[in-house]
Image (cartoon, helix red, strand yellow):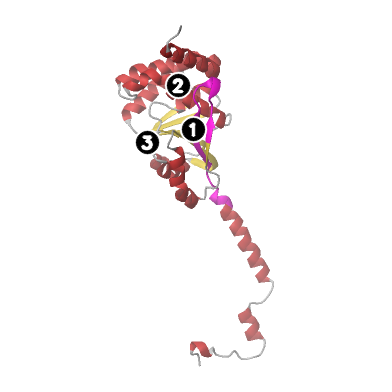
Amino acid sequence: MASDGEHEVSSDAAAAVQMFGDVLPRAEKYAALLTGPGVERGVVGPAEADRIWDRHLLNCGAVARLIPARAAVVDLGSGAGLPGIVLAILMPSVRMTLLESLARRVDFLQECVSVLGLPNVEVVRGRAEEYAGRLMADVVTSRAVAPLDKLAGLSAGLARPGGRVLAIKGASAEAELAKARPVLARMGVLDARISHVGGAAEGPAATVVMFTVPDHRASGERAGRSVGRADARLAGRPSSAAAGTGSGRKSRPNSRRGGG
C-alpha cells in the first residue's frame, strides 16, 4: 500500500504528464535546475524543493490557458522563472520576456534559458518602472511580486492598450482585489476579476487576478470626435454674443454685477 508521500508523488507525476505532454523532459530538466542550482544560489527556498511540482510548476502551467497563442508576454519580477519559463516551455509560440532586477536571479534565468534551449525567451534586467512604455506586451504575468494595489499599475505600464494582466495569487486574492478596487478604478479598469484555472487531473488550481489594460487613447479619440462634432454644429450658427451685437439692440448692463 502506498504511503501518503508516495501518493502525492504519483499524483504530481500524473498531473505533470497530463499538463506537459511531449515537453515533459524539458520541464523535468527545469525542475532539476530549480531544486539544484536554484536552491544553492538562494533563488529558490530550500523548503520549496520538495513541492516544486504541485506548488510551482503545475500551478504556473495552469495559467497557459489564459494566454493567446503567439502573444508577446512579459513576466514581471520573474525571479526563478515562475511562471515565465514554465509558460515558455508549454507555449513555444509565445515571445517571452523575463523582467528581473536582481543580478543573481538574472544570471540564473539566463542559465536556465541556455540549458533548456528556449529560443522564444529573452531575459531583461531592470525594474518595471524603467521599462514602462518601452515594453508593450499582449500579456503581463506575475507571481508573488507585490500586493495588487501596487502591482496593478506596474503591470499595466508594461502592457499595450487592451492588453491583459494576469497576477497569480493565493488565498489573499479576494482581499487584495477588494483593496485594489480604488486604484483600478482610477486606472479606468472595468473588468478586474478572479479566475481559478487548472485543477483536477492537472494538479491544484491556480488563482489568478486578471484585468484588461484600458485604451485611454481610444477614449481620447472618442472625446475628440465628440468635441469636433459639437464645434461643427456651432460653426453653422452665430454665437449668442454675435447675435446680440448684430440685432441693432444695445446690450444692457447686468445690474446684479454692478455694471453701469
Task: Check disc 3 and give the amino acid type.
Answer: Gly
Query: Is label 3 or label 2 in front?
Result: 2
Q: Which mark is residue 51?
A: none
Percent of width and height locating residue 65: 56, 28
Q: Residue at x 58, y 31 (%)?
A: 68
Q: Quadrant of residue 143?
A: top left
Q: Is residue 33 magenta?
A: no
Write down the region rendered in magenta: 195-218
Q: Quick check: marks 1 and 2 in contact, CB under 8 Å?
A: no
Q: Nearer the viewer, residue 49 or 6?
A: 6
Query: Badges 3 and 2: C-beta atoms under 8 Å apart?
Result: no
Q: Which mark is residue 207?
A: 1
Q: Looking at the picture, which amino acid does disc 1 mark?
A: Thr
In magenta segment, residue 201: yes
Is 36 located above or below residue 129 in the figure?
Answer: above
Q: Which mark is residue 126?
A: 3
The mark that comes first in sequence, 3 or 1, is: 3
* Residue 94 visible in rendering: no
Return the residue at label 2: 54
Q: Of the residues under marks 1 and 2, which one precedes in the sequence?
A: 2
